[in-house]
Amino acid sequence: MFPADFTLAYPIVVKKEMEVYLARQPIFSKNKKVYGYELLFRGGMSNAFPDIDGNTATSKLISNSFLSVGIERITGRKPAFINFTEDLLIKRIPLLLPKERVFVEVLEDVEPTEEVINACREITQKGFRIALDDFFYRAELEPLIALADTIKFDLRLTLIDELAEDVEKLSKHNVNLLAEKVETYEEFSRAVGIGFTLFQGYFFSKPEMIAGRDVSSSQMNLLEIMAEANKEDVSFGRLEEVIERDVSISYKLLRYINSVYFRRVNEISSIRQAIVLLGEKEIRRFLSLIAMAQLASGKPDELIRTSIIRAKFCELLGKASDVRIDSSELFTLGLFSLIDAVMDDSMEDLMGKIPLSEKIKQALVSGKGKISHYLKLAVSYEKGEWESVARLVDLTGVNEEDIPHYFMMALEWADSFAAI
């Protein structure tokens, strides 16, 4: 359905008393496949507001992420882009890490002194790849450019004309050009046209409006399956019928129920057995998830995985809240939160076609209502927007110290769908 190595952003919990909040932002190739992730760090909610110097942030990230947790828990098989300050570069700290898993990201305020250039040269000679962050061309940067594998431009900080000029200046170097802060498909297309080959930002989670596009018959069938699964009065027999008429869904259900996540001793071999073991609520969710995944065919894999993580995360936040709220409704809210990007249509138009509750529709269309706070908390956490997380914790009645655990639970649950 999607690769097992994707997660938009998540915290790593080494021990309860050693929480590390770690967000990762995907970096895409031109075909919208994940190329790597930039790791963004914060050390617990209590440290969300004071400034953390770059040395401390990177050192904690390394000790927790690489040494305690394992990089495979964070980026799967994709490389991690990690910020290094001048001091850490000079001390050759990157050499402590696995060279095949890491891009050494040189921050924009690092001056190309002889000491820095020598350090970067030794780091590259050891097999590491260097990325220059928030790049503005200066002649004195040429020694670092010659060592770099990737050069990153912030689209929000550079005019298009200036970007084109810098790209031309860099054409003599064998480097990958990465556009940061790519937030729309229009910006993505523009960056491709200029010559960029890598792209970082949340454009993939936005609708790609295409004139004349309509909902196909196959998409309507999938929407009908989702609608059937969300009917209050649907019977087990009806659910079994819906599943059995689609070979693909039947196969995926049996793979799911026999996955490591459930740790079954005996293999389940019939649809009815699977339905009984999962229960009505879980089988409804399964149908919704599978239908959503098929609807997202052709879209970046990140899209469906993010929807699934949000669904479970929102549900867990609801269960943990001291506010009385329907956690199953929060699951649906999270699952449908990116349906506009999946269908390339406006949320308002789509909500007119899908039989969801008015509370869910209001939260998705206008961001209003009590349940919307839980979705906003989930999205803020994904992106590492810690100030927003702190504010929303108060509105949702969730213990902030438990949030990393809930997100990891959501990730592991989503991983159970990765192999089906």
Image (cartoon, helix red, strand yellow):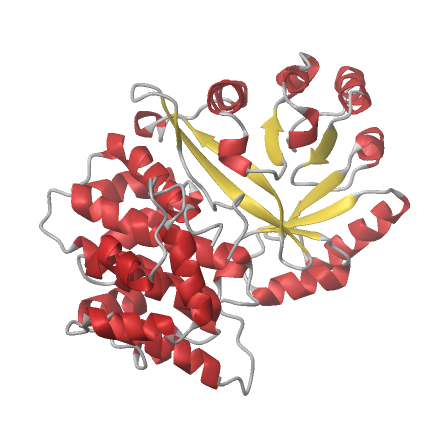
Measured as percent of width and height from the top left, residue 315 is found at 24, 50
Q: Nearer the viewer, residue 42 or 1?
A: 1
Direction left: furthest residue:
324
Measured as percent of width and height from the top left, residue 160 is found at 70, 59
Q: Is residue 36 above or below residue 2?
A: above
Measured as percent of width and height from the top left, residue 279 is found at 21, 57
Give the quadrant of residue 330: bottom left
Number of marks present in the image shown = 0
Q: Is residue 74 above or below residue 1?
A: above
Q: Nearer the viewer, residue 268 or 39?
A: 268
Direction right: furthest residue:
172
State the residue at coordinates (24%, 53%): 277
State the residue at coordinates (60%, 29%): 83
Q: Is residue 292 visible?
A: no
Task: Locate residue 107 relative to residue 56 in the image: left or right.
Answer: right
State the residue at coordinates (49%, 84%): 216
Task: Locate residue 80 relative to residue 216 in the image: left or right.
Answer: right
Direction top: furthest residue:
91
